[in-house]
Image (cartoon, rainbow, N blue to C red):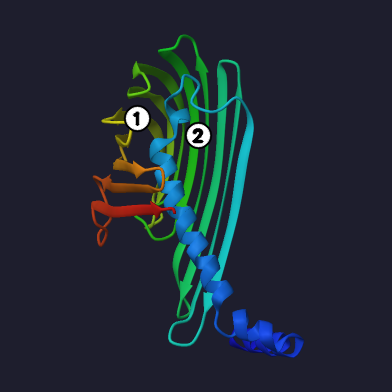
């Protein structure tokens, strides 16, 4: 990587001394790109909390929508790291039906040792019968080489109900049975009956402040996984927005050396002028 960057810098100097001094040598372009990345991540976090589509009757927009992203970084010198992440999402809404697909993968290495290797895919379909009642089917698969459960797959379905569905207050719950496959880090694997229960809560305190709380419980004889993501979204002005979030993940039966709880606190701030 160091040789590649050095060669690139020489080429830029030969091509245009002024341009190299303005952008190449001072790193302006690279830092501008990083600023854009951080800003976009913050906006995505805010949009996730405020996205009205997730509280609509069908859950996704009508028609076909999609997005994809790929990110790679490498560094050597004081630290030798390589990171690669990719993700894609596709939604399709037609009438009372909605479909959602998602894929993501993350790989990381530090000083010659792998420290991250994760892949997961999701699919969910739903059919609205009334503005309140709907049926759903869902499937998920996750592989993580650095967690208690190395492989975790679930296929199931059930019913969902929108308890409240207004612009200010929306709350829906869904749940049902399914089949779960797990493989632990020690090589133990099992296929068993399981159940999933989810809650999606949104409340707009004012036009500028809203609360969200998303909860998922996946249970079987192997273990019970609980995920809760609570967020407070502030839109102070048209140019200032903030989201404060707290995400908790609980595994009631981790292997030795692994913790039951993982907690993440996050703050996203976007300022425009």
Q: Nearer the viewer, residue 26 or 160?
A: 26
> Where residue 204 sits in the image (x, y, percent)?
30, 29
Q: How many marks?
A: 2
Q: Is residue 269 left or right of residue 99?
A: left
Residue picked out by circle 2: 139
> Where residue 22 sits in the image (x, y, percent)?
61, 81
44 to 219, vertically: above or below: below
Label 1 sits on a secondary structure element that is strand
Does the rendering let one see residue 190?
A: no
Q: Is residue 137 left or right of residue 8?
A: left
Residue 61 found in image quarter = top right
Residue 230 found in image quarter = top left
Q: Residue at x 34, y 42 (%)?
A: 235
Q: Nearer the viewer, residue 14 or 161?
A: 14
State yes or no: discs 2 and 1 in contact (Cβ < 8 Å). Answer: no
- Sequence-first disc among 2 and 1: 2
Classify the position of the N terminus by image quarter: bottom right
User: Which of the numbered marks, if any, corresponds to residue 198?
Assistant: 1
């Amino acid at each position: 990587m160091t040789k590649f960057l050095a060669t690139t810098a020489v080429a830029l100097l030969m091509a245009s001394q002024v341009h190299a001094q303005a952008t190449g040598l001072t790193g302006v372009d690279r830092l501008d790109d990083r600023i854009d990345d951080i800003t976009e991540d913050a906006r995505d976090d805010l949009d996730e909390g405020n996205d009205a589509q997730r509280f609509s009757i069908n859950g996704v927009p009508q028609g076909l929508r999609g997005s994809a992203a790929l990110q790679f970084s490498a560094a050597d010198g004081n630290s030798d790291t390589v990171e690669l992440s990719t993700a894609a999402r596709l939604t399709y809404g037609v009438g009372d039906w909605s479909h959602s697909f998602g894929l993501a993968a993350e790989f990381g290495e530090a000083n010659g040792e792998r420290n991250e290797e994760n892949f997961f895919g999701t699919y969910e379909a739903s059919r609205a019968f009334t503005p309140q009642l709907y049926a759903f089917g869902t499937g998920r698969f996750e592989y993580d080489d650095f967690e208690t459960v190395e492989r975790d797959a679930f296929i199931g379905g059930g019913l969902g109900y929108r308890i409240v569905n207004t612009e200010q207050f929306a709350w829906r719950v869904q749940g049902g049975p399914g089949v779960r496959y797990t493989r632990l880090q020690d090589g133990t694997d099992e296929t068993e009956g399981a159940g999933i229960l989810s809650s999606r809560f949104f409340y707009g305190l004012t036009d500028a402040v809203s609360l969200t709380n998303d909860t998922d419980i996946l249970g079987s004889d192997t273990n019970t996984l609980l995920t809760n993501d609570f967020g407070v979204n502030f839109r102070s002005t048209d140019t200032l927005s903030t989201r404060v979030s707290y995400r908790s993940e609980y595994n009631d039966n981790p292997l030795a050396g692994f913790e039951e709880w993982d907690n993440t606190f996050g703050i996203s701030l976007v300022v425009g002028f």
